[in-house]
Image (spheres, helix red, strand yellow):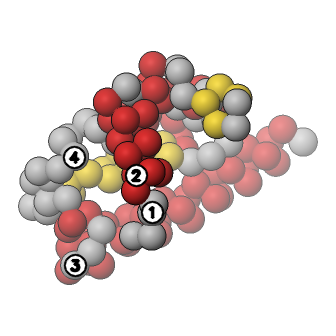
Amino acid sequence: MDLSEEFYIQTLIEVFQEYRLPNGTMTHRGRKVDPSKITKTALLTVEGENDDISGIGQTQAAHDICGNIPEQMRRDYIQPGVGHYGVFSGRRFRTEIYPRVREFSAISTRTRRAMRSART
């Protein structure tokens, strides 16, 4: 990763120690970050059953703080039998996770288009 030490440390503090995003205190360029304002972006969270870095539920919390995304544009998936790195690479990623990501992307694109057409 090409992240500066300062950015990495700032992220650890703000996101993982102070919980600024779920607590509603995160800002970007002086403006409050409000995930509840997200309404048109699909949300897919993926976790590994045996992840020893990010526990089950950590990414699922995004569904709580992004509560205004329509239900048909959300999905959570826990991949059996993989750890943290298996979520991002390897055979199980290629054969089980990536196909789900690709499918979700296609479905969410069609859903977003249908929702847009219904409004016009």
Name the residue type under label 4: Ser
Closest to the observer, 9 or 105: 9
Q: Which residue is mark 1?
A: 3
Q: Which residue is mark 3?
A: 90
Name the residue type under label 3: Gly
Which numbered disc flags the more N-terminal residue, 1 or 3? 1
At 9% from the left and 61% from the top, the residue drawn is: 81
**Above or below, comparing residue 78 to residue 28 in the picture:** below
Which numbered disc flags the more N-terminal residue, 2 or 4? 2
Distance, label 3 to label 2, CA atoms, is 26 Å
Which SS class for mark 1?
Answer: loop
Distance, label 1 to label 3, CA atoms, is 24 Å
The numbered mark at residue 54 is 4
Which numbered disc flags the more N-terminal residue, 3 or 2? 2
Give the percent coordinates (x, y) of residue 92: 20, 73
Q: Which residue is mark 2?
A: 8
Name the residue type under label 2: Tyr
Which numbered disc flags the more N-terminal residue, 1 or 4? 1
Give the percent coordinates (x, y) of residue 25: 53, 21
Is residue 108 something one can see in this rendering? Answer: yes
Structural crowding at the residue carrying mark 4, measured as other residues with C-alpha within 10 Å and reported as few (<14), some (14–19) or many (≥20): some
Closest to the observer, 112 or 25: 25
At 68% from the left and 42% from the top, the residue drawn is: 40
Distance, label 1 to label 2, CA atoms, is 6 Å
What quarter of the picture does the N terminus occupy?
bottom left
What quarter of the picture does the C terminus occupy?
top right
Q: Are marks 1 and 2 in contact (CB under 8 Å)?
A: yes
Which SS class for mark 3?
Answer: loop
Distance, label 2 to label 4, CA atoms, is 17 Å
Q: Please state which of the two labelled residues, at mark 3 or mark 2, is closer to the viewer.
A: 2
Which SS class for mark 2?
Answer: helix
